[in-house]
Amino acid sequence: MNVKFLNPFVEAAFEVLKIETGCTIQRGDLNLEKSLYITDDVTVIIALVGMVNGTVFYSMNESTAKKLASKLMGEKFDEFNSLAQSGIAEIGNVITGRASVKLAESGFESTISPPTMIQGKGASISTLDYPRIILPMSSELGEILIHLSLRQGNKNKLNAAQIPVPEAPKAS
Amino acid sequence: MMNVKFLNPFVEAVAEVMEKEVGAKTTRGNLTMQTSAMTTTDVTVLINLVGQVQGVVMYGMSFETGLNLVSQIMGQKFTEFDTLAQSGVSEMGNVITGQATIKLSRAGYQSNISPPTMIMGNGIKISTLDFSRIIVPLKTSVGEIDVHLALRESPPGMNNTNFVDLTVKNKTP
């Protein structure tokens, strides 16, 4: 993975979490993993398509998710209900959106997908041949791990599977 | 509310790809619509669409179906769902979604697809939040595949903008 894709995410996560929660955020040590990601309680998946191609996961445990949602919306969540889920997915969306704006400024335009939320501990998620950089962000709310499995895409954004295969010429 | 015209390209694409790659006939079961979270079966391939159609497509199947599928595609018997098998099933999802987007673009909806993500594990909940899902159960000779479509048409002018940026800017003092 290209390291220049990392900093926009670090900055975006710092800014967004700081503005939205008002907590002091600390960055932990980076890690590179090629193996499966075994899920924590809550995972938000957002894909990037364009000059940067790949997937970003935001993972945290349920207590962190509830605390974060409570901070974001200014109301106490005792249960991780659909409103809290939507809040957590939205923070993933905002961080990724802001990071993609920064990436676009450095010449890597990409579009982000709507967030998908996975709940349940112990499932394994594979990004196949994309290795993941893991970026831990900790605060008083708990730890949020940002998994980046990104690589440089091509300009016309087309995935190989989207190119129509021409029909074989008929033998005359 | 999902647009039903996004449905048929996927059903056709699955049938075509299954026929070409696996030599299997597909029959479609009854459609259902869900707004609650999806509970996974063993293997789920997740692919996002961005562009004039946005959302997520998920292909759910059991390990057995996944193994039958890759055994057929790669012409060798798989007994374990190893990385090669995972890659094969993901690629299948990629090809089907790619074909479907070609059909969608012919109908006037340009979109691009993300690389596939594979989720393995039973009983995990996947929520598409405010997108409702149409579930298309497909029966093939290698087993059952459920196609979950959570797609919607992007609002005009939004397909290439990072609209989320403003929400943060407004909050800064």
Image (cartoon, coloured by chain):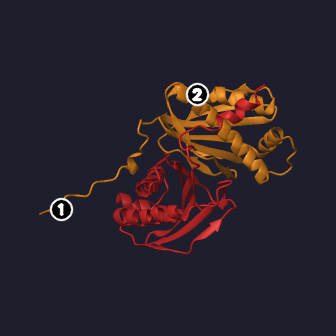
Seen from the viewer's position, the closer of residues A164 and B47 is A164
Q: Residues within 10 Å of mark 1 (few under 14, many from 20)?
A: few
- Mark 1, residue position: A170
Percent coordinates x, y for residue B161 in the rendering: 56, 38
Horizontal placement of B162 versus B87: left or right? Answer: right
Evaluate whether residue A124 shows in this view.
Answer: yes
Three-letter amino acid code at the position of disc 2: Lys
Name of the residue lying farthest toward the front: B156
- Mark 2, residue position: A102
Seen from the viewer's position, the closer of residues B59 and B159 is B159
Specify whether disc 2 shares its chain with disc 1: yes
Where is residue A27, by image quadrant? top right
Answer above or below: position of B33 versus B115.
below
Percent coordinates x, y for residue A151 in the rendering: 48, 35
| Subunit that carries the residue with mark 1 | A
Residue at image point 47% right, 62% down: B10
Three-letter amino acid code at the position of disc 1: Lys
Horizontal placement of A6 versus B124: left or right? Answer: left
Residue at image point 62% right, 36% down: A97
> Which one of the lettered chains is coloured orange?
A
| Subunit that carries the residue with mark 2 | A
Seen from the viewer's position, the closer of residues B161 and B17 is B161
Label 1 secondary element? loop
Where is residue B141, by image quadrant? bottom left
Q: Earlier in the sequence, mark 2 or mark 1?
A: 2
The alpha-carbon separation of the residues under discs 2 and 1 comes to 50 Å
Where is residue A87, by image quadrant? top right
